[in-house]
Amino acid sequence: MKTLMDLRAGEKATVKKVNGHGLLQRRLRDMGFVTGVTIKMVKPAPLGDPLEFKIRDYYLSLRKNEAMTVEVV
């Protein structure tokens, strides 16, 4: 299982599934993390957390524990 945590800076992937539950899952889906969408890992923060992603036409930062809930291919 590959997650957003496994992406390197500049790497693209396609969202396969959003795991997690409750408010976290709903929040991620509301932000655009739905099956089939392409996402690019832009860069990690200087200390490694959070991680910056580009999804559709906007940039978004996620904490590592949130990034681990999104499976990608």
Image: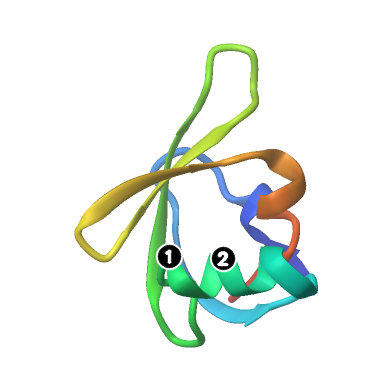
Q: Residue furthest front?
A: 23
Element at badge 2? helix
The figure's colour scheme reads rainbow
The C terminus lies in quadrant: bottom right
Element at badge 1? loop
Camera-nearest residue between 41 and 17: 17
Q: Position of residue 28 (x, y in %)?
A: 55, 66
Circle number at residue 19: none
Q: Is residue 70 visible?
A: no
Pointers 1 and 2 in contact (C-beta within 8 Å)? yes
16 up-or-down from 13: above or below: below
Who's the residue at 54% across and 12% down the image?
A: 46
Who's the residue at 52% across and 75% down the image?
A: 29
Who's the residue at 70% across and 67% down the image?
A: 23
18 up-or-down from 67: above or below: below
Q: Residues within 10 Å of mark 1 (few under 14, many from 20)?
A: few
**Mark 2 sits on what residue?**
27
Q: Does residue 12 appear left or right of residue 46 in this picture? A: left
**Mark 1 sits on what residue?**
31
Amino acid type assigned to the residue bearing label 2 in the image: Arg
Q: Does residue 72 appear left or right of residue 9 in this picture? A: right
- Counting the numbered discs, the total is 2
4 up-or-down from 41: above or below: below
Who's the residue at 80% across and 74% down the image?
A: 21
